[in-house]
Amino acid sequence: MALPPRNHMIFRQLFDQVSSTYTYLLADERTREAVLIDSVFEQHARDAALIRELGLKLLSTLDTHCHADHVTGAWLMKAALGSKIGLSREYGAENVDLPLSHGDIVRFGAEALEVRATPGHTNGCLSFVAADHKMVFTGDALLVRGAGRTDFQQGDPRRLFRSIREQLLTLPDECVVYPGHDYEGRTSSTIGEERLYNPRIGGGAREEDFVGYMKNLGLPHPKQLAVALPANMRAGEPENGRTPARPDWGPVATTYAGFPEIAPEWVARHRDAVNVVDVRSPAEFDGELGHLEGARLIPLDELRARALEVPADKPVVVVCQTGKRSGLGTVILAKAGITRVANIAGGMVRWRELGLPS
Ligand SMILES: [Fe+2]
């Protein structure tokens, strides 16, 4: 009998366009246990949907540091999925479940990340190194052909120089560097590449070169600083302690594809509370799968032009054969001003499989 294949690590790199932040989802393929590095508050629905769709169990969110340019999604993830909040103990931030220090190990399934203190951009910056030293998540300590600024938040170019030299450039050449940000479309690098070509610290640069470079960057103050720092000192908990408004009319979940979706079982139990729009063709509407009683037929091709025909006195649920066309239908109706709208997951095919009444 063949040996079971070696565990494979699930890896996703996600991007927030507003703050140019990279978020990383890592998971053990077999146990499905996962960690999320440097999540972004505004991307919560996207990240939570991906975790749900991949069938992962999020153990913790890890932040490489207390960010000045965006608010972490850590608290929202904990509220939604029960994940623990990991951050350097240096900051003394609120709501932290895993106060991390140099040398700690964060495990998920058979995978693990080694915590290395890499201060200098801030006093609590951490880098997370994969157990096999094939990848490192450097936050803002080491960036692709750059390094995090050191002109606020207890920044210290001499400390950052030593952190990069001693904790990061000592990793193997082939170790892939995944940064916390990039503003030029670069997604990753390697330790060997940065050792050679990083214009601030590579190619034999000495401490004085680095310090001189970092002191003369002349960067503008980060726009989000006044909002982001205090929020991140609470691990991203909103000031009123409440999660941002979600649809109040039903358990609507946003899919990773970006569509609002609702379970057919819920719709079957709340038929009087919603209007049903069926976006299939007339032939399908009267075909073998049949249609839901009271459903209004507007084929998808005509939905844009006929959106005003959709009554908005109740939330609108959209259905098609398998939930694909109706997913697009929810986007069309939302653009037409119908904000309370969701796709019936799985369409009429799932509805029939579940044996729900028409
Ligand atoms: Fe930063």
Image: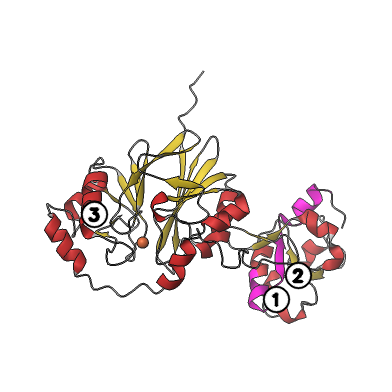
Left or right placement of residue 303 versus residue 21 in this view = right
Left or right placement of residue 298 versus residue 246 in this view = right
Q: Which residue is mark 2?
A: 316
Q: CA distance from mark 1 to mark 3?
A: 53 Å
Measuring from the top left, give residue 303's x and y in whole percent: 70, 75
Check residue 89 for magenta coloring: no
Binning the other alpha carbons within 10 Å of mark 3 as few (below 14), some (14 to 19) or many (20 upward) gives some
Q: Please name the amino acid that badge 3 sits on.
A: Arg
Measuring from the top left, give residue 229's x and y in whole percent: 43, 66
Residue range in magenta is 331-355
Q: Say which label, 2 or 3, has the lower sequence index.
A: 3
Measuring from the top left, give residue 135's x and y in whole percent: 34, 44
Q: Are marks 2 and 3 in contact (CB under 8 Å)?
A: no
Q: Please name the amino acid that badge 1 sits on.
A: Ile
Q: Which residue is mark 3?
A: 159
Q: Secondary structure at mark 1?
A: loop
Can you tell me which quadrant of the image ligand 1 is in?
bottom left
Tell me what residue is drawn at x 75 percent, y 51 percent: 350
Check residue 339 for magenta coloring: yes
Nearer the observer, disc 2 or disc 3? 3
Q: CA distance from mark 1 to mark 2?
A: 8 Å
Q: Say which label, 1 or 2, has the lower sequence index.
A: 2
Q: Say how many tags the image has.
A: 3
Say above or below: 221 vs 2.
below
Q: Say which label, 1 or 3, has the lower sequence index.
A: 3
Q: Which residue is mark 1?
A: 338
Residue reaching furthest front? 92
Q: Are marks 1 and 2 in contact (CB under 8 Å)?
A: yes
Figure coloring: secondary structure
Quarter of the image where the C terminus is located? bottom right
